[in-house]
Image (cartoon, helix red, strand yellow):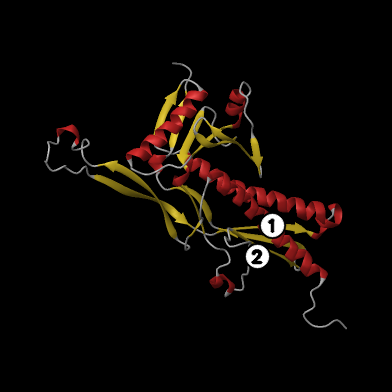
Amino acid sequence: MAKEKLTVASDITVAAREVDFVTRFTQNWEALREILGIVRPIEKAAGTKLTSYKASMKSDSLQGGASVGEGNEIPYTEFKVEPVTYEDITLEKYAKAVSIEAVAKYGAAVAVQKTDDAFLNELQSEVMDRFYDFLATGELTDTADSFQKAVAKSIGLVKDKFKKMHRSVTGVVTWVNTLDAYDYLGAANLTVQTSFGIDYVENFMGSQKLILSSEIERGKVISTPIENIDLYYINPNNSDFAQLGLVYTTDGETNLIGFHANGDYSHAVGESFALMGMKLWAEYLDGISVVSVDDSF
């Protein structure tokens, strides 16, 4: 008779799947963090409001300047920073199930692994799609008559904005539509790199990273300083969740996603559950430039 608490083959299979899932998810996001230059993800408590800020000058114009006489007091120019609250960062719950018949017909490598891959990709896309939608609401808007000029203007707008806010900019990240980029790159001697499915060009016209994405609308160029991008997340490995009997496998010090797999004998299916609460966010909405290409002028 086998001893108690023996780890059996089914335990290893499920645990390995959970570890593999969260590890691949984390690796993808670590690669994205490196590309975007995000220094440190910020763990937020559930229900925390996500807030962006708008900085502006309260005075009609800059005070002082050449009008200040010798020995006279230099007047202050008053500025204000207004918070704009958008939404809560909340936990998001997802699940999928694979029937025993699907495994019997196609094998676990197809029925389980392939659906895990699709599940992983969809979860990542969900986060990125929301971030792209948010980027498109940037308030530094303008037009240019060519792709190259749009990139240059997009970068210049954010650098100028942050200079006026007296905030340093160590680098700018720019997003463009994939087809727009290749239309231009076809005539240029540039190298497109790929990291975990993200295509980008380094040091392009003053942008530290030019990211190519089909999620960006054609004819749009979006830029923001690296310092303006934050990654907020809720830790799925919260000890309070464990008190409910809900224990998720996570990976590393930054627990961006939790994953759990188990068998449901009453329905003869293998269930998979994912738990995450993460958003890419820009601290200053008016620190995002959106330049449209209009070749009609």
Q: Residue 42, percent across and down?
A: 49, 57
- In this view, the residue farthest toward the top is 297
Classify 260 as above or below 161: below
Distance between mark 1 and mark 2 Cα atoms:
9 Å
Looking at the figure, which quarter contains the N terminus? bottom right
Residue designated by label 1: 21
- In this view, the residue farthest toward the right is 1
Question: What kind of element bears circle 1?
Answer: helix
Residue at the image position 42 percent from the left and 42 percent from the top: 169
- Identify the image quadrant of residue 138: top left
Tag 1 near tag 2, CB within 8 Å: yes
Work out whether mark 1 precedes mark 2 in sequence or the reverse, and give the earlier one: 1
Question: What kind of element bears circle 2?
Answer: loop
Give the camera-side residue of 33 and 99.
33
Q: Residue 239, percent across and down?
A: 55, 72
Mark 2, residues whose alpha carbon is within 10 Å: few (<14), some, or many (≥20)? many
Residue 96 visible in rendering:
no
Residue designated by label 2: 249
Q: Is residue 200 left or right of residue 17?
A: left
Q: Residue 294, percent across and down?
A: 47, 21
Mark 1, residues whose alpha carbon is within 10 Å: few (<14), some, or many (≥20)? many
Residue 179 visible in rendering:
yes
Classify 80 as above or below 107: above
Classify 32 as above or below 189: below
Q: Is residue 219 left or right of residue 7?
A: left
Residue type indicated by callout 1: Phe
What mark, if any, has residue 284 been given in the picture? none
Give the camera-side residue of 270 and 9.
9
Q: Is residue 212 left or right of residue 44?
A: right
Looking at the figure, which quarter contains the C terminus? top left
Residue type indicated by callout 2: Thr
